[in-house]
Image (tube, rainbow, N blue to C red):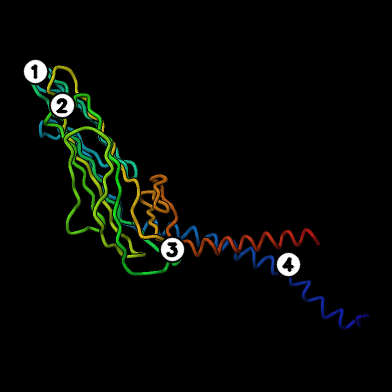
Amino acid sequence: MRRTRREAGRAQPNIKRLPIMNTVLKQTGLALGVLFLMAVHTNQSATATPIFSTRLLQAGALFASGTDSVSGSVGVAGGGFASGTVDIVGTEITSTAVSSRGTGTTPQTNTEGSYTYFDLIFSNILSPADTGDILVSANFFLDWNTSDPNTFQDFVQVSADINEGPVEFSTSFDNQGTFNIATPDVLVPLNEAVPFSASHISRFTDSVVGPETGDILFRLVDFTLPDGFTVNSAEAGIVNNFQVSASAVPEPTALPLFLGGLAGLAGLGFMKRRRKAT
């Protein structure tokens, strides 16, 4: 069918709008991308600062301390000495203690390490906006090795607290080995920042001539959750109930902006391909 000159003229404005649409999509995509980055930065800076505590003690006297890692040594009467290190990365606490007995001396080295994070977010995977409460528990792994396992004075005590419960979970061991530890169930709210803390205390006493070494690894494995639920933490580096690192990850509230930014960039790419094709 042959079009008249007037009908052909009506079609021209649609063609001329294409460059304007490209510009709008481009600006929209960039704006959404910027908003996403701002949301991530805001969410990360709005959370409370994590708390770390580490100490080394010899015979009950503090000889070194730090905020997230500590090391030190001290001499004792009779030529003995005590030394050690404590480090915290994410939800993992590691410590090494060395006690060396001198003449007529029984040195003792205590290690302490603890952390508190304030941004654990428990949520429904299929309905992220759900509210309410769920029961959760934390699963830990403890690996304790000592060069003098028969020393009756040695012990390791571990503790954990979810959502600042009225009673902190705590248990202790007086023999080396590997242990899987589960805390009791605790009620936590959905889509609200939940505090979480854990700690370990150890004591190593040298009972023979020569140094005694004690190594401890205490770390969070995961949380036991109802089916269909997960947990994330930017501070502790927990993503989908799995600790990937201690580095920051985007908060759930930033995801809508992130998806919007992706949609804008996808639209921009589509228009570029269309323009090349014409």
Q: Earlier in the sequence, mark 1 or mark 2?
A: 1
State the residue position of label 2.
150
Place of residue 224 in the rendered image (x, y in percent of width and height, measured from the top left): 33, 54
Give the CA separation, mark 1 to mark 4. 86 Å
Residue 143 image-quadrant placement: top left
Q: Earlier in the sequence, mark 3 or mark 2?
A: 2
Instruction: Say which of marks 1 and 4 sits in front.
Output: 1
State the residue position of label 3.
253
| Left or right of 278 on screen, residue 151 | left
Q: Nearer the viewer, residue 34 or 208?
A: 208
Question: Is residue 95 visible in the rendered structure shown here?
Answer: no
Give the CA separation, mark 3 to mark 4. 34 Å
Q: Report helix, strand or loop for mark 3.
A: helix
State the residue position of label 1.
78
Instruction: Say which of marks 3 and 2 sits in front.
Output: 2
Q: Earlier in the sequence, mark 1 or mark 4?
A: 4
| Left or right of 136 on screen, residue 65 | left
Give the CA separation, mark 1 to mark 2. 23 Å
| Left or right of 79 on screen, residue 219 | right
Residue at the image position 11 percent from the left and 34 percent from the top: 61
State the residue position of label 4.
19
Residue at the image position 21 percent from the left and 47 percent from the top: 159
Place of residue 248 in the rendered image (x, y in percent of width and height, measured from the top left): 41, 50
Q: Residues within 10 Å of mark 1 (few under 14, many from 20)?
A: few
Q: Report helix, strand or loop for mark 2.
A: loop
